[in-house]
Amino acid sequence: MILSALLIPTFPSISCSKNSNPPTSHFQIPTASSQKSHIKILLLSNLASLAFALTLNSPLPSLAIPSLNSGSSLLPPTTPFSQSQDLQIGLENGKIRPCPSTNPGCVSTNPKSSSFAFPWEIPESSTENAIQVKKLQDAILKTQKNAKIQVIEDTADGKYLQAEVDGGFGRDVLEFLVKKDVVVYRSMATKVTHVYPFTTALGDSKGQQERMKKILQELGWYEPSFEYMD
């Protein structure tokens, strides 16, 4: 009813009584064209009023604000600094891990490492893993500052030993895997320093190599080299 009342135009009513005088000559009967123009103007006016009324009564559109608990939140972009903070420790598929590309303070016997070192060889006739690991443990505690043995466990690939020692920028992690007469290892700094605004990390792989040489000399074991191979 309201819509029809807005859309249907109204015209002034003309009442003629029996005693009323006839309309004067200046009154003009609207023509068909003028009547159509008048109807068009009224329709446009009523439609504008209707649209304005609907706008006021319509609810405001809700804004799509992501929830704090939403699982599809955007992940922060990865940077060399953030990657260097996520250091993975432990064996990977039964092998010593390579040095991370974002951590220059590392040396590993894994051939995928940029700072590669040769595995050690145990020259003694006794190659029982438990005995060699005990010797390795004693050598670490004797040659390294504030050394602490974290893990010693048997695996299907040999005897695994993990230790923490003082490093140049914090604590370093030493990992060894002893299997018969071969010892593979990784020595890695757990803290990587970046100088703003550069993204290149600061590290000392030579310092890691010197540490491993001290342990090796204490043990009296053997390390191959490229010179020996020549």
Image (cartoon, rainbow, N blue to C red):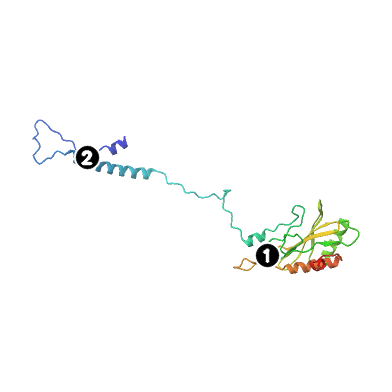
Residues packed near mark 2 inside 10 Å, few (<14), some (14 to 19) or many (20 plus): few
**Horizontal side, residue 68 vs residue 163: left or right:** left
**Horizontal side, residue 20 vs residue 106: left or right:** left
* Spot occupied by residue 10 in the image (x, y as percentages of width and height): 23, 37
* Spot occupied by residue 27 in the image (x, y as percentages of width and height): 11, 40
Instruction: Tell me the amino acid under the disc marked 1.
Output: Val
Identify the residue shown where x is 61% and y is 60%: 79
- Quadrant of res 123: bottom right
Nearer-the-camera pick, 166 or 179: 179
Instruction: Tell me the amino acid under the disc marked 2.
Output: Lys
**Horizontal side, residue 35 vs residue 99: left or right:** left
- Quadrant of res 32: top left
* Spot occupied by residue 200 in the image (x, y as percentages of width and height): 64, 66
Question: Under tag 2, what secondary structure?
Answer: helix
Seen as rendered, the residue at the extreme front is 230
Residue of label 1: 192
Residue of label 2: 36
Q: Give the mark nearer the N terminus: 2 vs 1.
A: 2
Seen as rendered, the residue at the extreme right is 125
Nearer-the-camera pick, 193 or 6: 193
Q: Could you give the CA–CA distance between mark 2 and mark 1, rounded to whole angstroms?
A: 84 Å
Question: Under tag 1, what secondary structure?
Answer: loop
- Quadrant of res 196: bottom right
Height in image: 23 above or below 130?
above
